[in-house]
Image: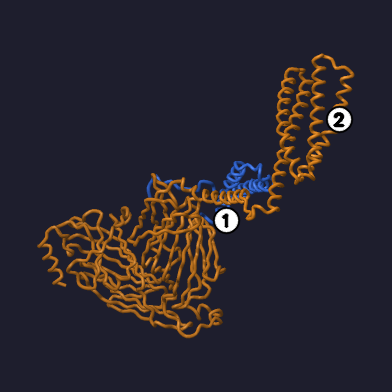
Amino acid sequence: MAQSAKPISSPVPIAYYPSLAVLLLAVGLVITASFFIYEATSSRKNRSLAKELVTGAVASVFLGFGSLFLLLASGVYV
Amino acid sequence: MSRFRFDLLLLLVLSLQLSPALSDLIISKLDRRIDLTSQIVRVTMTLKVENTGHDPVSEVSFTFPEHQANNLALLLAVSTEGKGKNRGAATNLPIGVKQPNDSPPSLVWYAASLPKELGKGESLNMDVLAVFTHSLRPFPEKITQAEPQLLLFQDSAHFTSPYNVKVQSLTVKLPSGNVESYTKLEKTKFSGSEIKYGPFENLPALSYSPVIIHFPSNKPFAIAKELVREIEISHWGNVQVTEHYSIIHGGAQSTGEFSRLDFQARPEVRGASAFRHLIAMLPPRAHSIYYRDAIGNISTSNIHSDSSKTLVEIEPRYPMFGGWKTSFTIGYGLPLHDYLFQSGGNRFLNITFGSPLFDVLVENLTLKVVLPEGSKDIYSSVPFPVKESQETKFSHLDIAGRPTIVIEKVNVVPEHNQYFQVHYKFSNISLLTEPLMLIFGFFALFVACIIYMHADLTISKSSSSYLAKLQWDEVQGTIQQLQDIINRCLLIHDKLEASLRELSRTGDVQACKAVRKSADSLLKDLSKELKPLLALLQSSPQAAHILPKVEDLVMKERDLQEKILLKHTTVVDSYERKSMSRDAENRVAAIQQKISALKQEVDDLLDFVEDI
């Protein structure tokens, strides 16, 4: 083994995975809810595509990282 | 034998550059110990090599009969300088097969290269470990449940060395003090559980004197016919090890019927040759350990862990008798930082090679190291010869698959449990591919929703219900816009009121007037925007039933607007005149009352319109 060998650990401490999963998924689901409320309540004429896309993108970032940490916390190391 | 020596001398004469004559070396002292306490036969030798020739020697050869060499799993030679307490550091000697052309048949030669040449008259101490598998033959080959297992071991009392040996002795350690029979030579001593042959003096090279030992042994005879060991690295903080075993009891075959009752009642007697459990020594901090087979979880396992190791005691579903087979899987996770290191731009995994099970011989070991997706420049360094190949494995959230290095080796004994390394290059950016895939997956879902909501999927575009729906959509849109405008008006009203409050506090008439001016222009714009919307609603038959309310709302709002503007003008005027007449005060109070009433009405109407 080389002398200068440095141990590598995970980018985020493993102990934080469950709480990160809950937090990110909660935020993601709230934004998802607001997205669908907007879809359902605004009429077709005055719906803004940019707003829909931005809400969707932000929600998917939170849901994406949230589900990643959920997988990691439950032992599926992707 | 003399012919063999003569040939060698001839060779030496023919090519002076050739390695020096083997007979130049002599072994002045050789102690050989054979350990028969487990199914794996371990031979340890301590020897002292002396150079009696003129030329320096750089290699020491060992020979084994072919039938033994076929079962040789490991041969290690260590040389030490000095004696007793002055013993220097041990150096591992590289060993290779080196078959001389004139070797007698059925002999296999191994040559250990010395760290420095052995000059004339010099001597060297060596320790040699040879591990043999499949060297114990059960005899009788078939036994019943109640019979003990008897094993037969065969070797030579004299070490078949290519050099002359001055003094040598052999000690054989048995698992117990019982022995069925053993070859008795002139110098043979049996004491305790050890049989001692020798010392024999001044033996010529390649002398042979067979000994046979027949002894009872009920040690576990667990042989893993096949072990697939998969080590999967996740840079998110885990090294997952999964081991698939198919184990057989390799001792004397069980014959006759098996009585569970007898076994349960007196397992030591009526099942002496069987083994009930295996013990795996996992590294410390192993977590999420499981033990299962094709049926499911096997609950008969136990874990004891401390800071230096994790002991897992696994019990197969049934006791293992001779010839019985079982297969199962154990798996565990290990913390990443204990096994993965970085040096320079390279990352490397440093983990043990063999099976963690105690005293299990693995006939075919397949070791797969699954590296994360995006690893490059992969190579492994294993301290002994192995067969190596590469493949790709598909697992969770993979696109191109994970590069996998496959290492195969036959006859793996516990001594092979050494650390080996797999080096590779990996960029931390690649860690983000998995979350990005999830993010794009979710985003695709949202985009699908947006498209669905925007797309018009009606087949018959001319049906009356479709047209009615279109019109209603339009009405709804208009009402929403109208609502929006009225809300903005209300906001401007609030601003005006706030400016009045500010005026009473600071007395800054100019600022108040400026607010009024901007409010005026805004309100004008809004009322302009309102007009076409209202016209649209009036023209639409769909909106007929809500039109009165909407018109009412607009009227009331306009009224409110007027009153507020009036109030604003009155107050500002009185401020400009620096005096507030009683009359003006009364007027303002009256307007204020109306404003409150109107505000209430407008709010109610807005609520109603919002419900549409």
- Asked whether, in this view, residue B400 is left or right of residue B53, the answer is right
Q: How many labels does the image show?
A: 2
Front-lying residue, B612 or B45: B612
How is the rendered protein coloured? by chain
Determine whether B246 is above or below B431 in the image. below
Subunit bearing disc 1: A
Name the outermost residue toward the bottom. B256
Indicate the colour of chain B.
orange
Q: Pinpoint residue B88: horizontal percent, then vertical percent.
A: 31, 53
Q: Pinpoint residue B547: horizontal percent, then vertical percent.
A: 79, 41
Q: Pinpoint residue B23: horizontal percent, then vertical percent.
A: 17, 65
Q: Pinpoint residue B434: horizontal percent, then vertical percent.
A: 51, 51
Look at mark 2 in the image and give the residue it sits on.
B594
Quarter where residue B412 is shown: bottom left
Q: Which residue is at 76% across, 19% downward? A: B506
Subunit bearing disc 2: B
Q: Can residue A17 be seen in this view?
A: no
Front-lying residue, B407 or B149: B407
- Asked whether, in this view, residue B423 is left or right of residue B274, the answer is left
Look at mark 1 in the image and give the residue it sits on.
A74
Q: Callout 2: 10 Å neighbours few (<14), some, many (20+)?
A: some
Mark 2, secondary structure of its residue: helix
Cα distance in 3D space between marks 2 and 1? 64 Å
Mark 1, secondary structure of its residue: loop
Indicate the colour of chain A.
blue
Q: Is residue B587 visible?
A: yes
The label on residue B257 is: none
| Closer to viewer: mark 2 or mark 1 | 2
Disc 1 residue type?
Answer: Ser
